[in-house]
Image (spheres, grey):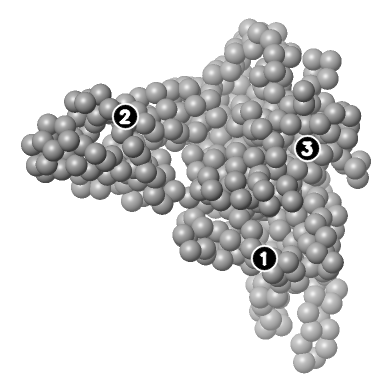
Amino acid sequence: MGKVVGIDLGTTNSVVSVMEGGKPIVIANAESMRTTPSVVAFSKDGERLVGQMARRQAVLNPQNTFAGVKRYMGRKYGELSADSKRVPYTIRRGDNNEVRIQCPRLEKEFAPEEISSMILRKLAEEASRYLGQPVTGAVITVPAYFNDAQRQATRNAGRIAGLEVKRILNEPTAAALAYGLDQQYSQTVLVFDLGGGTFDVSILDVGDGVFEVRSTAGDTQLGGTNFDKKIVDWLADDFLAAEGVDLRRDRQSLQRLTEAAEKAKIELSGVNVTEINLPFITATADGPKHLETTLSRSQFEGLCGDLMSRLRGPLKQALTDAGLTPDQIDEVVLVGGGSRMPMVHDMVRSLIRRPPNQNVNPDEVVAGGAAIQAGILTQEVQDILLLDVTPLSLGLETIGGVMKKVIPRNTTIPVRRSDIFSTSENNQTMVEVHVLQGEREMAADNKALGRFKLMGIPPAPRGVPQVQVAFDIDANGILQVSAMDRTTGREQSLTIQGSATLSEEKVQQMIKDAEE
Ligand code: AMP
């Protein structure tokens, strides 16, 4: 039998972990690193590079190097902000408004799921090598605030990688599992997770082997890379003013600026001033140009005011939803590389009024929790009960384009709720149901998960037919819909249209392609 591992599939870095002697351990990759950059590239000869090797050649091969793809998972092209479309490679709108990633080297296009599957494959192979046995299954973590489409996309990425996806687990919940495994007494824990591309806050009650999520909130388009972009823009705007050249327009310069910005940001977590040197960044009629400057921590913090307020919102929201005041939080666990920034640290500390826990490794704790969940599912770990919640309300469009909530956010999962539908015209044989996820009042402002057509309703006066539509959210946070005609007792056929996820047919094709 193959082994089941835990994988933290991050925007910037990914980590694989497995249970050994009752504890999760992180498996180092072939380059002896415990984290693997979530980067895939295709070299001159068309060879696939994943991780550090891919990252290292990014500046020389920006168009064929794909980083940060997690931001596109389960999203439609039209949903992307201008900021998230600004990457050194090319993404385009597909025929169904899906995100397509262009790879000029292979003269091919990829779905985000395919690129992510290559990262998962690499991690599974590293784990197989370490364990000396095949890895066939995985628990893969996602931001708690991922919606249904984003979760399905992640699960499909695992399947394309040839893995049986045993569970899609929320990252902050995973972190709490790893943190709480050895805790003796009951406590209320707030997990603040700022990764490369996403942000989550979850509040849990932890004790006696029970992990119960009380609330979760976040932003799936906010992470460390937003902070990098602030520095990129600052550098590029200054350069534009001085030299009349916009460095963001050239892929190679943009890639170099992005790398320098991230390095500066990380350095500013430790020192007060950092130097940024980019020789030969471009050339004008006057000859080669160099970029040379210094950035102080306070200058950097001054650039990030709006990002800091975007972090505060979900933090307060999670407290309100849990019905708690800051002094009722016993422990704060910081997760994700972004939480190392002093301004983030200070903000959390001032809002919660207690120093964050320093005992967990923010880069590895999520993968550890995924390994524990894998252990629970294979019965290697016993006596742990995990009760998670759905992060976003699920509902339907009703008259006037208003969303009616069927399952409110922060409901414990798995959960099943149903609603009765009828017809609005005489002898109507079909009803269309528009399924939505989100908190806004108007349907159009929420994420459209799909449209379901209920067909074959026997002719009857309007309002008479009764169709019961049931919504099941499973332990992965993934939705399933079924319908029953109450007059005939017949199960209804459902057709989904316009979902942001790949069709089953496409997934099967991609699994085949990947095997080849
Ligand atoms: P993760 O997804 O948890 O691996 O987080 C990666 C993000 O954390 C990236 O945006 C990194 O640039 C950022 N990061 C890592 N270390 C630090 C640090 N010491 N200070 C600030 N940001 C960091």
Q: Are marks 2 and 3 in contact (CB under 8 Å)?
A: no
Looking at the image, tell me whether mark 3 or mark 1 is earlier in sequence order.
1
Three-letter code, disc 2: Glu
Q: Residue at x 19, y 25 (%)?
A: 487
Three-letter code, disc 3: Ala
Residue 108: mark in rendering: 1
The mark closer to the camera, 3 or 1, is 1
Q: Residue at x 48, y 22 (%)?
A: 414
Q: Are marks 1 and 2 in contact (CB under 8 Å)?
A: no
Looking at the image, tell me whether mark 2 or mark 3 is earlier in sequence order.
3
Where is residue 369 drawn, in percent x and y?
Answer: 70, 26
Q: Is residue 513 above or below residue 130?
A: below
| Residue sitting nearer the eye, 22 or 213 | 22
Q: Which residue is mark 2?
A: 491
Q: Which residue is mark 3?
A: 124
At label 1, counting other C-alpha atoms closer than 10 Å, the crowd grade (few under 14, some 14-19, many 20 or more) is few
| Residue sitting nearer the eye, 217 or 398 | 398
Image quadrant in which you'd find residue 142? top right
Where is residue 129 drawn, in percent x and y?
Answer: 88, 35
Image quadrant in which you'd find residue 357? top right
Q: Secondary structure at mark 3?
A: helix
Looking at the image, tell me whether mark 1 or mark 2 is earlier in sequence order.
1
Q: Residue at x 31, y 33 (%)?
A: 492
Q: Is residue 147 above or below residue 224?
A: above
Measure the C-alpha gap from mark 1 to mark 2: 42 Å
Q: Is residue 178 above or below residue 58?
A: above
Three-letter code, disc 1: Lys
| Label 1 within 8 A of ligand 1 by Cβ | no
